[in-house]
Image (cartoon, coloured by chain):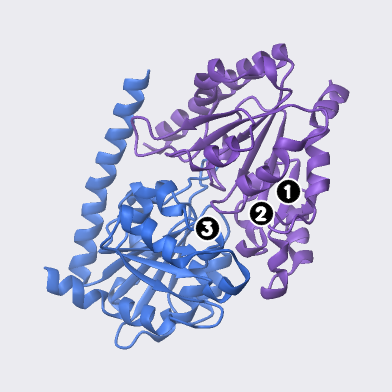
Chain colours: A purple, B blue
Amino acid sequence: MHRTKVRIVEEALDANNTIAQANRADFDRAGVRVVNFMSAPGAGKTALLERVVADLPGVRVGVLEGDVQGSMDADRLASLHVPVTQLNTDAGFGGECHLDANMVRSALSELPLEDIDLLVIENVGNLVCPAEFRVGEDARIMVSAVTEGEEKPLKYPLMFRACELVLINKIDLLDHLDYDLALLEANLDQVNPGAARMPISARTGEGVDEFRDWLSRVPDRVRAAA
Amino acid sequence: MHRTKVRIVEEALDANNTIAQANRADFDRAGVRVVNFMSAPGAGKTALLERVVADLPGVRVGVLEGDVQGSMDADRLASLHVPVTQLNTDAGFGGECHLDANMVRSALSELPLEDIDLLVIENVGNLVCPAEFRVGEDARIMVSAVTEGEEKPLKYPLMFRACELVLINKIDLLDHLDYDLALLEANLDQVNPGAARMPISARTGEGVDEFRDWLSRVPDRVRAAA
């Protein structure tokens, strides 16, 4: 029973990787770079995107918005006049807790790939499964809110290990929390010492310029790495 | 392909329910009531349990601690001299994002059922899948931190619908947030109007007495409902 389950999981992840590569090839052909944007529920992904997507110098952004159901986040971003495509994971199920490559593939024809340079895929809020499923992205960013505690890299190592950039959000609340930013960084160093990290506040705007700059340079970095 | 996946998911949930009923029967025989305790990562489940489990009037508590990996939360609770059993979900996988009935069943022999009246199962931090998998519990509690935003009941309705009690944690931060407690309650009413709700702060202790009282009366309520 256990061996069977391991095999099913491995086969599902294999199939996912194959489809993710096909997505990547299609994005490459269209000249679109892709960021997979992940966090726990309520860490501030949408609020951070609201701060930057309409205003990336020289980069036209589109958003693919993943949610179990509804379109609340997509509606917020669409009001910024950025192309937003909604992808719900509850079709036929109680609701998937992550996006996978096939779900993203099902949305490809709806994406305005000719009109954008960078696609930000806002994943379902979850610190476990989104990190296990590549969707065809060039870079992965996660948000860890200081309200969640400093130990999260040790409890959800796969997620923190998967990302090139960790945004440490809600730093406007630091004065009101017993939170040790140096401890978070030390814990992050244990699982992913090479990860870039940026303290930031979607609420006050602190650190937002650095994030906007990082995001606008994704196409250049991908080109340089190729 | 899609039909096959739906069938596999349905069969898995069917099998889970069968095993959950077997767990429930074993708990009943031992006279132990069981609470499934859920939330997003970092909402404060462990901090709230630290406030109450060692001090429930007339009720001996044990904890089954679910985590992807590690035993940080179990160690915190064990220091209160409460029996704690660790259950990790990463054996053989990248890490399951929830507990299921079979995982709990695998831990039954390690639980001191003769020495406790109430078992609190602290689930993996996740607002999606834990709500889909019954584990043999009598009651379900979730924690929604005010730092996560008021819209969470609408974005993760299955979780909010599944619970008898919603703890609205971190209210000590309300003065520093743009958070509308009445809006959270209105959103909760849309998906689960019958849910009890308690504003609480694990940090300051506000509301903790009410939570302790609710938890200590779980055995009585189960008996009355039988």
Examine the image and state in which quarter residue A184 appears. Answer: bottom right
Is residue A5 rendered to the left or right of residue B19?
right
Examine the image and state in which quarter residue B4 appears. Answer: top left
Q: Nearer the viewer, residue A124 or B179?
A: B179
Q: In percent of the image, x 84 and y 29: which residue is there?
A: A221
Q: Position of residue B183 (x, y in %)?
A: 43, 61
Q: Are marks 2 and 1 in contact (CB under 8 Å)?
A: yes
Relative height, residue B144 to residue A69 (above, below) = below
Alpha-carbon distance for marks 3 and 1? 21 Å
User: What's the chain of the residue with tag 2?
Assistant: A
Q: Amino acid at mark 3?
A: Gly
Q: Residue under label 1, please give it.
A: A166
Q: In percent of the image, x 51 and y 22: which residue is there?
A: A102
Q: Residue under label 3, please give it.
A: B149
The quarter of the image holding the C terminus of chain B is bottom left
How crowded is the residue under tag 3: few (<14 C-alpha within 10 Å), some, or many (20+)?
A: many
